[in-house]
């Protein structure tokens, strides 16, 4: 079966920066393979483009420029947030959660959630980088297709892959 829209794809991949010999980013080898429904917006469109029509047993290797992956690194996405914004209801500020490298979740007035990482902790403000961790990086994927099958109606309905005993309330 070829990889097409609404098929469940199982694959292993290794992700490195720029080329197969580049800096290691992550891999599924030695762990559970990646499983996803093809063509329904679960994965980057540019990622899927390189896998369309492949069969179980096929291997792949391709490179995505930042523009086709997680975007360019934007300096404007690094912002200083006044320290007062981190106070809890009692006015307490837990600085142990605001050390460089700590992940942060911030809400705007409309309730949208933004994920960032603390870049610098100043006395009066915290510098937070809201760029996607993969932004600005050229991604090289190398791997192999393990299985391709039709998604079941309930998988398409739920928008995720079900494993044997997966049960829903
Ligand atoms: Zn489900």
Image (spheres, rainbow, N blue to C red):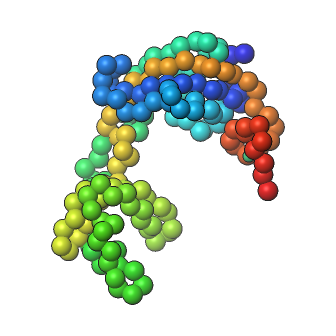
Q: Residue 37 in the image: state x and y as whole percent.
A: 66, 33
On screen, residue 130 versus residue 13, left or right, reads left
Residue for point 41% across, 39% down? 70
Question: In the orientation shown, which residue stands out farthest toward the front?
Answer: 30
Q: Residue 105 in the image: state x and y as whole percent.
A: 42, 62
* 54 and 109: which is toward the camera: 54
Q: Is the residue 125 above or below the residue 87 in the image?
A: above
Instruction: Assign the C terminus to one quadrant of the image.
Output: bottom right
Residue 107 in sight in this render? yes
Residue for point 45% across, 16% down? 61
On screen, residue 108 versus residue 73, left or right, reads right
Answer with the quarter of the image where residue 147 lies: top right
Number of disc labels:
0
Question: In the orientation shown, which residue stands out farthest toward the bottom?
Answer: 90
Residue for point 29% across, 59% down? 118
Answer with the quarter of the image where residue 64 lies: top left
Instruction: Assign the N terminus to one quadrant of the image.
Output: top right
Q: Is the residue 24 above or below the residue 98 in the image?
A: above
Residue for point 65% across, 26% down? 9
* 48 and 24: which is toward the camera: 24
Q: Residue 106 in the image: state x and y as whole percent.
A: 41, 65
Q: Is the residue 150 above or below the residue 56 in the image?
A: below
Q: Is the residue 25 above or below the residue 63 in the image?
A: below
Q: Residue 67 in the image: state x and y as whole percent.
A: 38, 33
Residue 53 in sight in this render? no
């Amino acid at each position: 079966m070829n990889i097409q829209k609404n098929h469940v794809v199982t694959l292993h991949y290794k992700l490195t920066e720029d080329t197969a010999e580049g800096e290691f980013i992550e891999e599924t080898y030695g762990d559970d393979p990646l499983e996803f429904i093809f063509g329904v917006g679960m994965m980057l469109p540019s990622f899927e483009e390189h896998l369309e029509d492949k069969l179980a047993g096929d291997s792949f290797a391709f490179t995505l420029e930042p523009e086709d992956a997680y975007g360019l690194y934007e300096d404007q996405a690094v912002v200083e947030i006044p320290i007062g914004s981190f106070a809890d209801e009692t006015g307490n500020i837990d600085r142990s959660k605001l050390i460089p490298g700590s992940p942060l979740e911030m809400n705007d007035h409309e309730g949208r959630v933004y994920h960032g990482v603390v870049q610098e902790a100043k006395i009066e403000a915290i510098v937070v980088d809201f760029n996607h961790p993969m932004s600005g990086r050229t991604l090289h994927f190398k791997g192999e297709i393990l299985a391709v099958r039709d998604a079941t109606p309930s998988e398409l309905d739920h928008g995720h892959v079900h494993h044997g005993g997966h049960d829903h309330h």
